[in-house]
Image (cartoon, helix red, strand yellow):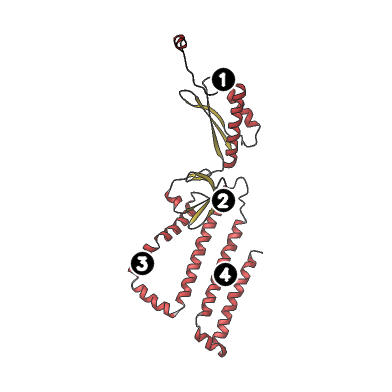
Amino acid sequence: MKYYTRLVIPLLVTLALAFSKLYYGEESKDWEGVWSYLPNINTVLIICGFTWCLLVLMQILKKLFIKQYDISQEDNLKARKVLTQINILVKVANFIIILLGIGLILISFESVRKVGVGFFASAGVAGIIIGFSAQKAIGTLIAGIQIAITQPFRLEDAVVVEGEWGWIEEINLNYIVVRIWDMRRLVLPTTYFLETPFQNWTRTSADLLGSVFLYTDYTIPFDELRKELDRILETTPLWDKKVKVLQVSDAKEFTVETRILVSAKNSPTAWDLRVFVREKMIEFIQKNYPESLPKTRIEMTQKDINKA
């Protein structure tokens, strides 16, 4: 019931204004001079009150929908999808409500209506001028609606934009806020995400594969590395027990490149798991196979030694 109480005040104010116009505007001669001086003031206030009621009603409906979904759960893909749509659609609805309210206020004045007739008479030229001047604003609004429908990302999706890694924190009609991993905020226009490629690490699932690359000498025993990787993963709760792979991904002139793939439940955990595995694997090599650390070989003959 606490959501509905927010509607009481704007509704009572609007009803009071409507009754005051009905009673004082039509029956009370004492107010006749006031209404003749400001014939539209009560109408404007009623429109403002009605617009206020609609805006509060939209927020109540938003709260009721959001209450059914919990994004704090681990498997929150559906919740984030719905919340993203609701947030954007409510912002669009609020924009339209305010725009209609302003329009109704303007046409309540006789002078504005007369100007409106002349405006519509030259609607072709005026439409072109307004179209050019409002091109970016309209494009941004359409971009916001497209994001709500197609959902290339959702709230709290892990993304990489402009070389920065972070999470979608706010989705507005004209801009998107990305919370960077070091707590900075990257603010980008909504049109950016429709025109520029970006990475979404949690598009279909929060699960992620983390990669770790090791560079060692050719003498490293890969079977021992695999055994140590198994041991490391069994000791940490960061691993979700789905994927563990150790493969030789490249052989360079002086070193062998070994790639480790491990899975985690979400992007922050995947980052911590990668760091943990990298550190422990390096410690294992340093302690047990120091001769297999990267090195440069120089072969010298007896003749070269005599010359030295």
Q: Residue at x 58, y 66 (%)?
A: 56
Whether residue 260 is visible to the viewer of this picture, yes or no, is: yes
Gap in angstroms between the C-alphas marked 3 and 2: 39 Å
Report helix, strand or loop for mark 4: helix
Residue type at mark 4 is Cys
Whether residue 203 is visible to the viewer of this picture, yes or no, is: no
Closer to the camera, 214 or 105?
Answer: 214
Gap in angstroms between the C-alphas marked 1 and 4: 76 Å
Gap in angstroms between the C-alphas marked 1 and 2: 50 Å
Q: Callout 2: 10 Å neighbours few (<14), some, many (20+)?
A: many
Comparing labels 1 and 2, the label whose residue is closer to the camera = 1
Residue beneath disc 2: 80
Whether label 3 touches label 1, CB < 8 Å:
no
Q: Callout 1: 10 Å neighbours few (<14), some, many (20+)?
A: some
Gap in angstroms between the C-alphas marked 3 and 4: 32 Å
Residue beneath disc 4: 53
Gap in angstroms between the C-alphas marked 4 and 2: 28 Å
Comparing labels 3 and 4, the label whose residue is closer to the camera = 3
Residue beneath disc 1: 291
Which quadrant of the view contains residue 112? Answer: bottom left
Whether label 1 touches label 4, CB < 8 Å:
no
Q: Reading the chain from its start, which is encountered first: label 3 or label 4?
A: 4
Comparing labels 1 and 4, the label whose residue is closer to the camera = 1
Report helix, strand or loop for mark 3: helix
Residue 127: image tag: 3
Residue 118 shown left or right of residue 168 in the figure:
left
Residue 147: image tag: none
Q: Reading the chain from its start, which is encountered first: label 1 or label 2?
A: 2
Q: Callout 3: 10 Å neighbours few (<14), some, many (20+)?
A: few
Could you tell me residue 305's position as x and y percent? Answer: 47, 11
Residue type at mark 2 is Arg
Residue type at mark 1 is Glu
